[in-house]
């Protein structure tokens, strides 16, 4: 075991991978019969590079692990996975362009990629027209169900809905009024539409809502609105993006909007990585909701965090998006092995129903191309991690949200040709 | 009363961020007529200077003075951004006076270079480079005039640049080996944490105000007063005003317009650095931090009337107060039982995004009636 870990750490070259197979027990004798090249497409430059490069690191690690364990076995032949990394440059048309390049020129059977909803929306027509396959690892607003995209992040009913429920029923601010804050783009607006419908069902009240244009860090008007709407404290649902969170938390703390004075913020976009950037001293006592948290105390979770630190440095952290990225590589491998081919359609069919013991616990691919996942609510602690307060059982994904007025009563099922993308329940 | 005070304070707080950011531009764009799109990046350098100063003040030797790092960084940021501005003027902008389109493109290029520079060069070596630039620029001016006038002065100048480069490399390596956070290049945003005496709130007449906001207001006030005194009372200020009003005439009367240009641009850039310190207290520090402010800065300067400091001051406070009035829906709390259609309209605009739209619309309408801003410029720029 010790040897294989050490090898894992330095696993870039093929020769090392070959030695490792004997430890990994993949059943191959020495070398691989062939190679298969997959595509990795995230932003390595521009605003999103900070977040997306962690996914590239995780996907590389997963591929190296699979290779060390003998690669992918298809039709009795063992394949070593190789990858081509392309830079989406935080520019959505570039994502579409690079996707075309990976599919047409490099002929990859699968692309792991994307982060923002905007990049996914830009790539979607490319994959649909070429009938290629994209694996997308981020928690998102749902309201989409493509036959050519496989979504391993959470849908709103696997993140925001349990979180809203927790805040209204069991948090220290239970029964309080809600204020919704977000960046001004599709995810926060969709997510808040769902939250508003849910709060109404629960019998609560949303007393205010505001969106900050991307790039704007002046939150003074929002603060005075929060103070006016929630004079005695209450629940704040935060869907701000990236560094706007830094401005928001610095300034609300200075303005006295803190857990100790009765204001509790539930965050949907702040994971371990972001906590360390913003600084735990500004976030302590607030909440987050994710499928995976680094503090999950299971062997699978610890092993994931440990191998990541070993591979990329001890100061690195793992968070929910990385876990989703890790899972999708393994799920693809399993589906390919079950299908016995790299061909898209056969893999797509084999993919539904695949299960995997992920770091968060067992996950399963559902007929709507999303994953069933566990939801966790955590409170941010002084060490920059989450103290897990609640854990749901496995929650099934809803590609079409049942609380959003435009998609209520619809679902998606790609295993049944008569149902497809959007059918009435 | 409390409501009014709160609203006024918020307006002034938002306005002072705009003002401190636009002050440098009011000088560079207003007095010199240079469209400097790299102004935001000079702010960014100031913000990074604050971050580096903060980390250096965490070293054991300087730890006792940690609480005062923010004051020190104001001066350092002024010098760093000022020097970078001077280099920019000497190498690029000087060659482009009188051709605004080319200046616009060139400075935009510079802004991209500066952004990429902080992304891909470790901050320790960036600091080293800035230190060597400062030494290289200022060391030759300290030589006695006898050496300065000798024909061999260029060799002295050359050797002082070599000395500067060596010092820069040395300080760069010392910093990178002592402060590990500065030794690696990173595109990740960093964070300036205000010292403890600046966190939390302070109560004035029964209303609580965040201390960081008060600090920004103080920084802004001091900058405005200092720059006004400099322009109106000092002899260099007089020369700057003279060159602004009539360059050829000032040149004929023996004012070194070249030197005036350098000083004006240096001061304008230095003020951008000070603005960088202020904005680093509000949000995170990253390569794009200045870019978020540049449009606002130009808006303030144009609205105030190009070339007029008082106009800039009034315009930024005006925009600040309007932002707060519209964005926070204040009118509703001042007049709670207004007719429904009106209150619905106000509610519609009472979000940050819509408030921005509204402010821009109001400015566009205002400029229809007064295209030269609140206080139109008289003098050279008008004659040309």
Image: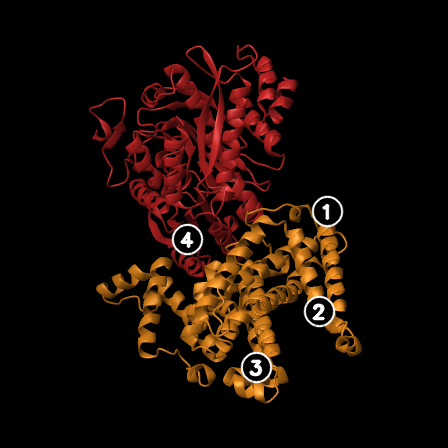
Chain colours: A red, B orange
Badge 4 marks a residue whose secondary structure is: loop
Q: Are marks 1 and 3 in contact (CB under 8 Å)?
A: no
Q: Residue B168: x and y, percent?
A: 71, 57
Q: Chain of mark 2?
A: B
Image point (31%, 24%), residue name = A367
Badge 3 marks a residue whose secondary structure is: helix
- Lateral position of residue A129 relative to residue A151, left or right: left
Q: Are marks 4 and 1 in contact (CB under 8 Å)?
A: no
From mark 2 to mark 4, how far is it between C-alphas? Answer: 41 Å
Badge 2 marks a residue whose secondary structure is: helix
* Residue nearest the viewer, comparing B314 with B177: B177
The residue where tag 2 is placed is B138
Q: Residue A78: x and y, percent?
A: 48, 14
Mark positioned earlier in the residue sequence (1 or 2): 2
The residue where tag 1 is placed is B177
The residue where tag 4 is placed is A214
The residue where tag 3 is placed is B240
The relative height of residue A52 versus residue B282 in the rendered view (above or below) is above
Image point (23%, 66%), residue name = B339
> Same subunit under labels 1 and 2?
yes
């Amino acid at each position: 075991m010790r040897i294989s870990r050490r090898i894992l750490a330095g696993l870039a070259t093929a020769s090392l991978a070959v030695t490792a197979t004997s430890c990994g027990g993949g059943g191959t004798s020495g070398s691989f019969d062939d190679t298969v090249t997959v595509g990795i497409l995230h932003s390595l430059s521009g605003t999103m590079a900070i977040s997306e490069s962690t996914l590239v690191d995780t996907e590389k690690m997963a591929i190296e692990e699979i290779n060390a364990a003998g690669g992918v076995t298809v039709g009795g032949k063992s394949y070593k996975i190789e990858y081509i990394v392309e830079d989406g440059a935080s520019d959505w048309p570039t994502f579409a362009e690079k996707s075309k390049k990976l599919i047409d020129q490099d002929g990859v059977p699968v692309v792991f990629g994307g982060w923002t909803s905007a990049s996914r929306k830009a790539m979607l027509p490319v994959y649909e027209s070429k009938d290629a396959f994209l694996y997308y690892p981020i928690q998102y607003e749902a309201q989409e169900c493509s036959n050519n995209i496989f979504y391993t992040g959470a849908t709103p009913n696997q993140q925001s809905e349990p979180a809203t429920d927790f805040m209204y029923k069991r948090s220290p601010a239970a029964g309080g009024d809600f204020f919704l804050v977000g960046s001004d783009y599709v995810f926060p607006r969709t997510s808040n539409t769902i939250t508003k419908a849910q709060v109404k069902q629960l019998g609560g009240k949303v007393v205010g809502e505001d969106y900050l244009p991307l790039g704007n860090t002046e939150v003074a008007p929002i603060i005075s609105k929060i103070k006016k709407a929630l004079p005695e404290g209450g629940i704040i649902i935060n869907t701000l993006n990236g560094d706007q969170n830094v401005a928001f938390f610095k300034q609300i703390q200075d303005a006295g909007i803190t857990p100790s004075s009765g204001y509790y913020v539930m965050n949907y976009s702040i994971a371990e990585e972001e906590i360390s950037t913003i600084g735990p001293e500004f976030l302590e006592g607030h909440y987050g909701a994710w499928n995976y948290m680094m503090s999950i105390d299971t062997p699978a979770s610890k092993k994931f965090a440990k191998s990541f630190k070993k591979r990329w440095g001890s100061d690195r952290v793992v968070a929910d998006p990385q876990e989703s990225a890790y899972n999708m590589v393994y799920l693809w491998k399993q589906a390919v092995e079950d299908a016995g081919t790299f061909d898209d359609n056969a893999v797509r069919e084999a993919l539904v129903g695949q299960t995997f013991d992920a770091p968060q616990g067992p996950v399963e691919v559902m007929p709507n191309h999303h994953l069933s996942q566990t939801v966790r609510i955590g409170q941010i602690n002084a060490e920059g991690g989450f103290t897990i307060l609640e854990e749901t059982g496995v929650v099934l994904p809803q590609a079409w949200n049942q609380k959003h007025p435009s998609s209520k009563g619809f679902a998606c099922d790609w295993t049944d040709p008569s149902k497809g993308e959007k059918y009435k329940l | 009363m409390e409501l009014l005070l709160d609203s006024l304070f918020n307006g002034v707080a938002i306005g002072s961020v705009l003002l401190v950011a636009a002050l440098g531009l009011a000088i560079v764009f207003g007095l010199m007529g240079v469209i400097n799109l790299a102004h935001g990046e000079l702010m960014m350098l100031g913000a990074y200077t604050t971050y580096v100063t903060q980390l250096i003040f965490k070293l054991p030797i300087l730890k006792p003075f940690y609480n005062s790092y923010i004051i020190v960084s104001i001066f350092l940021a002024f010098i760093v951004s000022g020097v970078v501005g001077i280099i920019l003027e000497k190498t690029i902008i000087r060659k482009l006076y009188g051709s605004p389109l080319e200046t616009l493109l060139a400075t935009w290029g510079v802004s991209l270079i500066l952004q990429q520079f902080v992304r891909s060069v470790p901050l320790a070596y960036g600091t080293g480079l800035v230190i060597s630039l400062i030494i290289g620029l200022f060391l030759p001016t300290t030589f006695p005039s006898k050496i300065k006038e000798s024909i061999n002065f260029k060799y002295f100048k050359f050797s002082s640049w070599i000395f500067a480069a060596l010092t820069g490399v040395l300080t760069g390596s010392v910093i990178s080996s002592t402060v590990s956070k500065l030794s690696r290049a990173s595109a990740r945003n960093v964070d300036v944490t205000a010292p403890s005496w600046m966190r939390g709130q302070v109560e004035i007449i029964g209303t609580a105000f965040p201390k960081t906001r008060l600090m920004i207001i103080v920084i802004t006030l001091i900058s405005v007063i200092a720059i006004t005194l400099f322009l109106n009372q000092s002899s260099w200020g007089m020369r700057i005003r003279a060159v602004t009003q009539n360059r050829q005439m000032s040149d004929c009367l023996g004012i070194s317009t070249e030197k005036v240009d350098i000083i004006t641009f240096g001061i304008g850039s230095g003020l951008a650095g000070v603005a960088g310190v202020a904005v680093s207290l509000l949000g995170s520090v990253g390569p794009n931090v200045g870019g978020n402010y540049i449009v606002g800065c130009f808006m303030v300067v144009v609205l105030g009337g190009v070339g007029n400091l008082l106009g800039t001051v009034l315009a930024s406070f005006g925009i600040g107060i309007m932002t707060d009035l519209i964005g926070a829906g204040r009118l509703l709390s001042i007049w709670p039982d207004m007719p429904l259609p009106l209150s619905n309209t106000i509610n519609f605009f009472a979000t940050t995004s819509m408030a921005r739209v509204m402010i821009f619309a109001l400015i566009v309408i205002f400029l229809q009636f007064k295209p030269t801003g609140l206080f139109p410029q008289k003098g050279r720029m008008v004659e040309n």
